[in-house]
Amino acid sequence: MPIHPAIASKLHLLEGLTSFEIAMADPEQRAKLDEFMSITGAPEPPQVDTRDDAAPGPHGPVPVRVYSPAGGDSPHPAAPRPALVWVHGGAFVGGGLEMPEADWTARQICVRAGAVVVSVDYRLCNGGVHYPVPHDDVVAAFRWVRDTAADLGVDPARISLGGASAGGNLSIGAALKLRDADGRPPAALLPIYPVAHAVVPSASASLAAKMAEVPALLRFFPPQMTWLNENYLGGPLSGADGYAFGANAVLDGLPPTLVINAEYDDLRSSGEDFVARCALAGVGVRQVTAVGMLHGFLNTRPDIEPVGQALDLMAEVVAGGRVPVPA
């Protein structure tokens, strides 16, 4: 499939832009970047009940935002709601609870799954912060949701864990830690366009041909990935354990897992390889490719068909605690 027309029609706005950092600092370039990322005319995000809270963690309190279906309590008090602990992306150095990938995704899953969603504001790898701090924050947030399930109105046996991009990495590592340290992995795992490898596997010829159509500004080239992943680790990639990058782990015993990759994404080879490793380990895993989409598609408007389909599938997993297999 070609790049989705809703995305392709705006690619010209990126001509001449060499980096996000420079574009963000230059008013003229920032205007182009803002227009490209624009969600003008998108439907208003679902209105749900939200509140900010904090989970206790080994590095201090972890801020979280709790999303509940409007109206508060579950319609059936004897049947608490499912929950999703959600982790935004941002290359371990950026992002936050206000970005669409965090806020809009949480609202969509909250409504579509009838679930409580807890979005995690983990510490970013800036100013001397490195692994395992973000990893520990996500584990702490999940444990807090599980331990306070009654107060949150959720079923402690139906708490899923997921994230996008760097958040997908963190969700995998946290699920492994919960499996090993607690003997209680999440009900389901949802890494969306994740980076599961310290060194991203080489692209297939097919993927390489597709990526040639994508502007360099939206690519993840090996030198960039090396810097980002070393910055996350705080050291050489050779020191990465399985909690830092899930592809290095023994994956047996992970819960039902849904991986959604973007068709036009340098990191797709990481997501695909992680799925293959899960299958070999006997994990119930399903892989879906969001056709025509670029990395970070959860930051775009949900009425673009592949985005809406991805959200529906994620909600189905969260609501049921299982990964549906296509007929």
Image (spheres, helix red, strand yellow):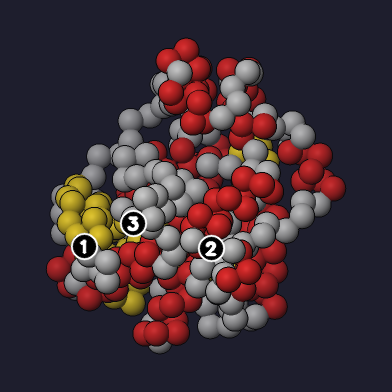
Q: CA distance from mark 3 to mark 2?
A: 20 Å
| Image x and y of residue 20, in percent | 51, 30
Q: Are marks 2 and 1 in contact (CB under 8 Å)?
A: no
Return the mark for residue 61. 1
Judge the density around disc 2: few (<14), some (14-19), many (≥20) Cα neighbours within 10 Å: few
Indicate the secondary structure of the residue bearing disc 1. loop
The amino acid type found where label 1 is placed reads Pro
User: Closer to us: mark 3 or mark 2?
Assistant: 2
Which quadrant would residue 94 be assigned to in this image? top left
| Image x and y of residue 210, in percent | 76, 38
Return the mark for residue 235. 2
Identify the residue at image location x=58%, y=71%: 239
Q: CA distance from mark 2 to mark 1?
A: 25 Å
Left-right relation of 66 to 196: left
Judge the density around disc 3: few (<14), some (14-19), many (≥20) Cα neighbours within 10 Å: many
Residue at image mark 3: 122
Q: Are marks 3 and 2 in contact (CB under 8 Å)?
A: no
Q: Is residue 222 above or below residue 27?
A: below
The amino acid type found where label 2 is placed reads Gly
Judge the density around disc 1: few (<14), some (14-19), many (≥20) Cα neighbours within 10 Å: some
User: Closer to us: mark 2 or mark 1?
Assistant: 2
Left-right relation of 297 to 220: left
